[in-house]
Amino acid sequence: MQSKGMPRASVPTSTQILQFKYHNRNRHNLHNQNLNHKASADSSKFAMWFSKSNFEVKGKTAIIVGASQGLGVELAKQLYLQNCTVILVARTTKKLEFHADQISQLTVPSTHTAKATYFTCDAASYGNCEELWKNVAAGGYEPDIIMCCAGSSVPKLFADLTAADLQLGMDVNYKTAINVVHAGFKHMMAVNHQIRPQEWTKRNVVLFSSVVGLFPFIGYAQYGPMKSAVDSLSLILRQELKPYNFRVSCVYPGNFLSEGYEEEQKTKPAITREIEGSSPAISGEECASIVLDQLQKGYDSITTDFIGWVLSCSVLGTRPRQWGLIQVVVGLIFSIIEPIVSWTIQRDISKSVK
Ligand SMILES: NC(=O)c1ccc[n+]([C@@H]2O[C@H](COP(=O)([O-])OP(=O)(O)OC[C@H]3O[C@@H](n4cnc5c(N)ncnc54)[C@H](OP(=O)(O)O)[C@@H]3O)[C@@H](O)[C@H]2O)c1
């Protein structure tokens, strides 16, 4: 924790360096909204060229794991309103029932055919995921879109983490994603065994990592490595499932408001807050709109704010690009100034340890 009254060096703090995300966030959000409005205004022109058919949802079915609250619910609402059947999955039946019911009651045109339903499943258990896919098929559903949105963080300093925190981090953030996709793929292989891979129905897997998975920092030892694992999984699945007509996308959200986010604030160390900055998180609704918009534009590495995009430039590797040439330039600049960023972060951390 930084001492009050301690003179600040003239070198910018890690907060100042990283906080530009927040100074830019509102501008970026406004920019996004303006872009959205402009896109609506010019929809006939832009939709044809840029957005069309990269992520068809109308008449499709989406299974969303982690949809009893937070982003999963927002995604389900927005997909349903676009006439996509949504299957909500999580562990808490009451919440699932409530949200599936609320979604079913949304005002939709008379031509609307999509449904909202739910299945209770602890996706950290592989057996439960196998059961889930059987039940989904028995219900007459064949998901075209598989969203692995379950995840949560217990931000604490390393010394304060418990064994249970560590186990939860692995279960909820990584096992839910790999179990759902692997059990689902095995299920599809059994169903489609007579069909050649390239003739399979087109499907989309959307994994949810985090900016912390790309740029890990103090306080996220229980969470960041698992989100890096989800990122890594997306790279492998993109290669391995493409011959089976799968498109694999990975989302790296920055902070957005949700029940999970509220929970995180209770344990988040002061130094972690300091590095993150203090401006408010975007709404879950806005985050869901950004994700769907980016998928429609054909992007497979999706960030939800400006700093996320900048940080993604520092780890381009084999990840799909978004404004690739500019990302290379930003990545180069980042790699030049990165030692200063790391130095200031480390200096702030050292000051916080008394
Ligand atoms: N909020 C942020 O600022 C932020 C930032 C970066 C990344 N993210 C990521 O974005 C995703 C959504 O975040 P969020 O804030 O909306 O999350 P959230 O509010 O904490 O909701 C998490 C959801 O996952 C479900 N879940 C947890 N464990 C599960 C399990 N074992 N099996 C099935 N479902 C399970 C929860 O439902 P039950 O408890 O009922 O099972 C809940 O519906 C997560 O992957 C998160 O890590 C969030």
Image: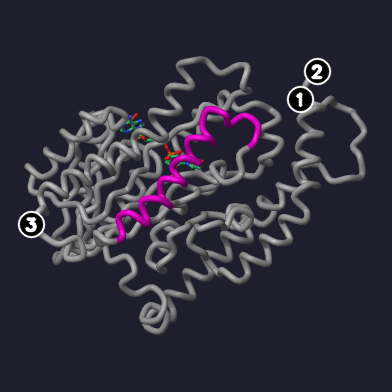
Q: Is residue 317 above or below residue 140?
A: below
Give SS at disc 1: loop
Q: Is residue 306 above or below residue 122?
A: below
Q: Which residue is mark 3?
A: 194
**Quadrant of the rendering where the C terminus is positioned:** top right
Q: Is residue 27 left or right of residue 115?
A: right
Q: Which residue is mark 1?
A: 1
* Disc nearest the viewer among 2 and 3: 3
* Disc nearest the viewer among 2 and 1: 2
Determine if the magenta segment contains residue 189.
no
Q: Which residue is mark 2?
A: 354
Q: CA distance from mark 3 to mark 1?
A: 62 Å
Q: Amino acid at mark 2?
A: Lys
User: Who's the residue at 47% across and 71% down the image?
Assistant: 37
Classify residue 59 by image quadrant. Answer: bottom left
Give SS at disc 2: loop
Magenta span of residues: 217-242
Q: Amino acid at mark 3?
A: Gln
* Disc nearest the viewer among 3 and 1: 3
User: Who's the residue at 31% across and 60% down the image?
Assistant: 242
Residue 184, given in percent of the width and then of the height, sits at 22, 44
- Mark 2 crowdedness (10 Å alpha carbons): few <14, some 14-19, many ≥20: few
In depth, the one of 177 and 353 nearer the eye is 177
Asked if the residues shown at circle 3 and circle 1 are in contact, with their CB atoms under 8 angstroms apart, the answer is: no
Classify residue 66 by image quadrant. Answer: top left
